[in-house]
Image (cartoon, rainbow, N blue to C red):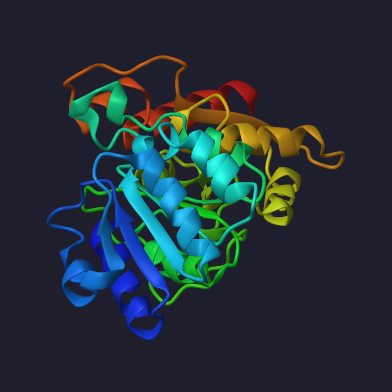
Amino acid sequence: MRPTFIKTLVELAQKDERIFLLTGDLGYAALEPFREKFPKRFINMGVAEQNMAGFAAGLAMSGKLPVVYSIATFVTLKTLEQVRNDICYQNLNVKIVGVGSGLTYSQYGATHHSQEDIGLMRLLPNMKVICPGDPVEVEAATRAMMADPQPCYLRIGSRGEPVLHEPPIDFQIGKGITLRPGKDIALVATGNMLENTMKAAELLRGSGLSPQVVSMHTVKPLDANLLKELFINFQQVFTIEEHSQIGGFGSAVAELAAELHDGRASLHRIALPDQFQKLGAWLARLRQENGLSPEGIAETVRKIYNQTS
């Protein structure tokens, strides 16, 4: 996802001199293409993420189009007050890119695990929250985000995520994408859980179920119309995310579901439990222990489906 984001941003910056890229002293071996082409529009702010957010607000007020880039926890938890007051309160055209979504930086521990970022960003007025599921969605999301006049948070992975779509795709902020139709259950994934959700769907098909797979790449605003259709047409809807079960994508869908009067489906959220993760464990192991591996997702879905059907 990360190389695709940088490549797309470079292409856009060639046509738009307003685009600046700010980093908090990281992104080496990733950001060089932008730095080499546009050295005067690349600013390393050092380990000073709060200053970086305020500086980006100033650039936006001066007519520039700044992109703030760092590890997801660093540009959300560390900078929350500045993002809220300097950027969102004034509805400034600042783009925040959080790399290493979810447990991507697994071995570095809780300081690098972005378990709360979706919840924090979706709380902020004027902020849009976009979580693409593969490189194809990253490219489309980057183009859509840079064309949007409001603050946006783009949450991406950095582990060589595979292509899952056949491009081109019809990408619109706030509109989900159905990758595979199904008849029995709906699997609605956001962000870097799309790959494992697709694999889980194959496992479920092997056991006789027909799951529909949806990529809900935008958490705010949600695609309310698509979700309403899923709740009407299916008896079971599952949300899948690599984020805390509290406040994230599943919570957003639950809030919508609670207000529906014509939906018949029950909602089940597959997410991280309300606890910190182990220090030093690798990503595959953490996902397996938290039920977010393809096998774990399929097992949870199959168990609930058998209990309720």
Query: Along the horizontal axis of the image, is 270 left or right of 297?
Result: right
Q: Residue at x 43, y 47 (%)?
A: 53
Query: Which quarter of the rendering shows the N terminus?
Result: bottom left
Looking at this view, is 39 or 247 the one in front?
39
> In the image shown, does 162 or 212 lie closer to the viewer?
162
Q: Is residue 186 visible?
A: no
Q: Is residue 297 visible?
A: yes
Q: Is residue 50 left or right of residue 218?
A: left
Name the image quarter holding residue 93: bottom right
219 up-or-down from 114: above or below: below
Number of marks present in the image shown: 0
Residue at the extreme right of the image, as rendered:
261
Front position in the image: 187 or 160: 160
Residue depicted at x 60% and y 60%: 150
Q: Quadrant of the C terminus?
A: top right
The image shows residue 215 at horizontal and vertical percentages of 50, 53
Q: Residue furthest bottom?
A: 15
- Position of 245 compared to 115: left or right? right
Residue at image coords 57%, 41%: 84
| Residue furthest out toward the left | 29
Q: Position of residue 101 (x, y in %)?
A: 35, 41
x then y, percent, for residue 43: 27, 59
Say which residue appears at 27% left-offset and 25% top-offset. Answer: 286
- In the visual, does 29 lie left or right of 212? left
Where is residue 179 drawn, in percent x and y? 48, 60
